[in-house]
Amino acid sequence: MEPPKTAGAVRDALANTMAQVQARQMDARTANTLAYLAMSLPRAIEVSDIEQRLDALEGTQLAQERTFLQSTPPDIETRGGER
């Protein structure tokens, strides 16, 4: 079985597990363990997706800040106390 990476893949894996238990191809104890583990997987997938989106936003923000700082003229120092 390929590790599920989306909520839909978790759903499909659980449906497959149910079918295997029904066909007596998997014991109920193993199926119970898989179902227990599958309960936390969608939340972990969601958190991982949010982390990736945040990293991308931070990268974009840093690039925009660098562009802004490079396009801003340097401060002109005043001479003789004039402003």
Image (cartoon, rainbow, N blue to C red):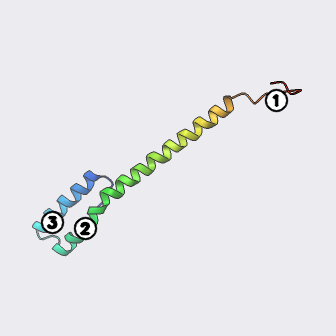
Residue drawn 33% across and 54% down? 5
**Of marks 3 and 2, which one's residue comes earlier in the chain?**
3
Foreground mark, 1 or 2?
Answer: 1
Query: Which residue has dot 1 on it?
Result: 77
Q: Quadrant of the C terminus?
A: top right
Residue under label 3: 20
x and y percentages locating residue 30 in the rendered image: 22, 73
Looking at numbered disc 3 in the image, what kind of residue is underneath it? Gln
Residue 22: percent from the left, percent from the top?
Answer: 10, 66
Residue situated furthest left in the rendering: 22
SS state under label 2 = helix
Q: Residue furthest right?
A: 80
Q: Is residue 20 above or below residue 75?
A: below
Which residue position holds label 2?
36
Three-letter code for the amino acid on which mark 2 is drawn? Tyr
Q: Nearer the viewer, residue 55 or 17?
A: 55
Asked if the residues shown at circle 1 and circle 2 are in contact, with their CB atoms under 8 angstroms apart, the answer is no
Q: Quadrant of the N terminus?
A: bottom left
Q: Nearer the viewer, mark 3 or mark 2?
A: 2
Tell me what residue is drawn at x 82 percent, y 29 percent.
Answer: 77
Q: Nearer the viewer, residue 23 or 75?
A: 75
Three-letter amino acid code at disc 1? Answer: Glu
Q: Is residue 52 above or below residue 60?
A: below
